[in-house]
Amino acid sequence: MPWRLLRFALSKKHPEPRMFRAHAELKRSYDVVIIGAGGHGLAAAYYLARDHGITNVAVLEQGYIGGGNTGRNTTIIRSNYLTPEGAKFYDMSVKLWQDLSEDFDLNLFYSNRGHYTLAHTDSAMRTMRWRAEVNKHYGIDSEVVDAAAVHKACPMMDLSCNGHAPILGALFHAPGSIARHDAVAWGYGRGADQRGVEIHQQTKVTGIEIVAGKVKGVHTSRGHIATSKVLCAVAGSTPRITKMIGIDTPLFIHPLQAMVSEPLKPWLDPILVSGSLHVYVSQTARGELVMGASLDPYELHNTRSTFDFVEGLSSHMIDMFPFLADVKVVRQWAGMADMTPDFAPLMGKTEVEGFYLDAGWGTWGFKATPASGKTMSYTVANDRNHELIEGFTLDRFRKYAPTGEKGAASVGH
Ligand code: PYC
């Protein structure tokens, strides 16, 4: 055991830096109110304080820090997107991820593994080539590889997938990584708190005060707050908030389920995704397999899990890895994915002055956390959309100018 740890264990005092302060009262006013203490809300608070010097900020959370989609995903980080807008935005995110543990002085278990999107059909191979070309154009490390390269990276996989869907090749994305999701929320939360931001858990927003088209305040379960800027970063709860101010969005909420196996000896180094078999999987430092599939195919504002999901995903996992047949599933969960019609996010200023949206994350919100924090803090601080989110604003739907990102989804939806 390292001496530092032993000293800590034997000491009666534990002078560890605090994680967050608990605030008894809300102040009567803040420069900025952020709704949602998930990764995105806390990242925006952190960069508002660190990069823009705006610290009179309250982050309001109806539950607990990181208890929404931040704690309900499969922690995959990548930037191999299909559209130029997506590729550039997620490239910024991947670059920020690489230094985040050091930035926070907190181990995020960030682990670079490489990411294979498997292609089982000629048309999937065509899409992989398309993505690789877009990615290379923007300096993102992606290439199409053949089935032999996939076998080399993952010799344990049955390349015929039980004869159902033989693998022809893959899009290989070397920067693909995973990280510990809870720690990301804690790191951003602690960093924001240390700079003066207040995080108020168990504080529900019940209304937003608008006067002459401008934000004037927020009503909460703990009283009223005056503010002229509100950032809404609540993923699957976005429609509840936008309804309060009469903004129409094209969001639909679908459950996105996932599950985890018992810990196994390390055998799976890369992250694997199969669009045809509806599987994505990685192995954590603890040895668990973290697995997910497509969205549930109906709208539901709920985080319930189903047996149907475990059965379907397990059978496809066994097509790929027959030796897993006796491995136990130990946990499952669901998040509420806020889906847009074009699969790109919904970010930036809105028709209500002082109300900013960070939503539409669908199935890729976790990996976006640092870039969404950076770009939304810039947008809120300057009341001007950051250039990297110009393709993601709400008015693209009114202008019939979608940013079609569906081809970059991990699995079919
Ligand atoms: O976009 O990589 C992804 C992803 C994995 C799980 C859900 N989305």
Image: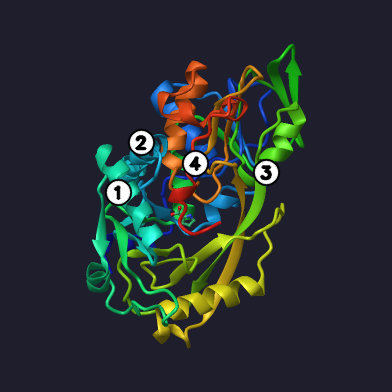
* Quadrant hosting residue 388: top left
- The answer to whether 63 appears left or right of 69 in the picture is right
> Which residue is nearer to you in this view: 71 or 54?
71
Q: Residues within 10 Å of mark 4 (few under 14, many from 20)?
A: many
Position above or below: 200 against 247: below
Position above or below: 318 against 178: below
> Looking at the image, is mark 2 or mark 1 earlier in the sequence?
2
* Residue denoted by label 4: 189
Asked if marks 2 and 1 touch (Cβ < 8 Å), the reply is no
Q: Nearer the viewer, mark 2 or mark 1?
A: 1
**Marks 4/1: CA–CA distance:** 35 Å
Q: Which mark is residue 88?
A: 2
Image quadrant holding the N terminus, namely: bottom left
Residue 179 in view = yes
Image quadrant holding the C terminus, namely: bottom right
- Inspect the image, locate mark 4, and give the three-letter code of the amino acid beneath it: Gly
- Inspect the image, locate mark 1, and give the three-letter code of the amino acid beneath it: Ala
